[in-house]
């Protein structure tokens, strides 16, 4: 199987260790993903902010880049949600039906990391070790658009040394929502406060999720309050071993 890593622009620019951890996990399972240098933003930011026409070239670039691969893996439920639910629709709205068909085909082969591990590779135990008390935040796009459900939990429960604790009101949004956090700062901050309170109630030293964007938001709040709780992407937990726990 020819596998590609779609790192996403946020991970590539701000959290490269998440992409490296994704590669580490996949290589451990016998797959060496390619990293096409042509890849860029998926266009979600443009669409969600009201610029669908400007997003269309990004859709075309994404399709051209990842069409040759059997599977595309991304450490982001948000970006995979955009690829599946926005790309073909954008092309159709622009009257480019050929591009829409190609976009649907690429989207059908694109997976959020936990989906790829559990559904495609049929693996739950990836050989990880992470000796920390951890709580998991199901991000909105992974929860509602992709419906990843129990997949991340199944992967986390198989991690050696982990103390996995349930997050109260886990399904509530953390308040990030991309530009929502900028345009609606007060509401976003109130939602973040609720999420941080829930994380604090677990006594966890680590909050994890499948989206670096939400972890950036939550982690920033936790750091400002000096709670001692850090945020770690799911991929980084799964990449941890006895020799080098994340």
Image (cartoon, rainbow, N blue to C red):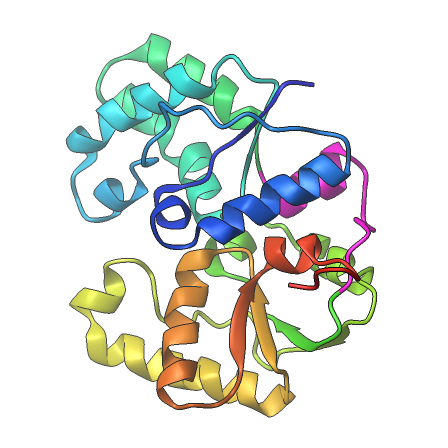
226 sits to left or right of 114: left
Which residues are drawn in magenta? 112-129
Q: How many labels does the image show?
A: 0
Residue 243 visible in the displayed image: yes
Q: In which quarter of the image is residue 100?
A: top left
Vertical arrangement, residue 101 with respect to residue 112, above or below: above
State whether residue 40 is above or below residue 1: below
What's the residue at 33%, 32% (across, down)?
40
The answer to whether residue 146 is visible is: no
User: Quick one: quadrant of the C terminus?
Assistant: bottom right
From this viewpoint, which residue is outermost toward the top?
Answer: 98
- Residue 227's x, y, as percent? 48, 90
Residue nearest the viewer, comparing 9 with 78: 9
125 drawn magenta: yes
In percent of width and height, residue 125 lies at 83, 51
Give residue 217's quadrant in the image. Answer: bottom left
Check the image and report above or below for 182 versus 20: below
Residue at image point 59% right, 49% down? 21
Q: Farthest residue to the front: give it.
A: 243
Left or right: residue 191 compared with residue 107: left
Q: Which residue is drawn at 45% across and 66% down?
A: 215
> Front-most of 22 and 244?
244
Q: Dividing the image into 4 quarters, which one contains the N terminus?
A: top right
**Residue 163 falls in image quadrant:** bottom right
90 drawn magenta: no
């Amino acid at each position: 199987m020819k596998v590609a890593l779609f790192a996403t622009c946020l991970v590539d620019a701000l959290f490269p260790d998440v992409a490296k951890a994704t590669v580490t996990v996949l290589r451990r399972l016998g797959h060496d993903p390619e990293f096409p240098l042509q890849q860029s933003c998926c266009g979600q930011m443009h669409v969600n902010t009201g610029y669908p026409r400007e997003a269309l070239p990004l859709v075309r670039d994404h399709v051209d880049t990842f069409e040759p691969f059997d599977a595309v893996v991304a450490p982001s439920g948000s970006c995979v949600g955009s690829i599946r639910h926005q790309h073909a629709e954008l092309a159709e709205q622009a009257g480019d039906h050929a591009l829409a068909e190609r976009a649907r085909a690429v989207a059908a082969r694109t997976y959020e990391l936990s989906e790829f591990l559990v559904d495609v590779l049929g693996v739950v135990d990836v050989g990880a070790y992470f000796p920390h008390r951890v709580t998991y935040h199901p991000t909105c796009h992974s929860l509602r658009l992709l419906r990843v459900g129990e997949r991340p939990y199944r992967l986390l429960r198989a991690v050696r040394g982990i103390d996995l604790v349930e997050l109260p009101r886990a399904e509530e949004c953390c308040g990030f929502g991309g530009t929502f956090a900028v345009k609606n700062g007060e509401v976003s901050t109130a939602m973040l406060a609720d999420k941080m309170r829930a994380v604090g109630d677990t006594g966890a030293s680590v909050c994890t999720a499948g989206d670096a964007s939400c972890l950036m938001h939550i982690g920033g709040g936790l750091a400002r309050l000096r709670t001692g709780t850090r945020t770690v992407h799911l991929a980084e937990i799964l990449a941890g071993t006895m020799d080098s726990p994340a």
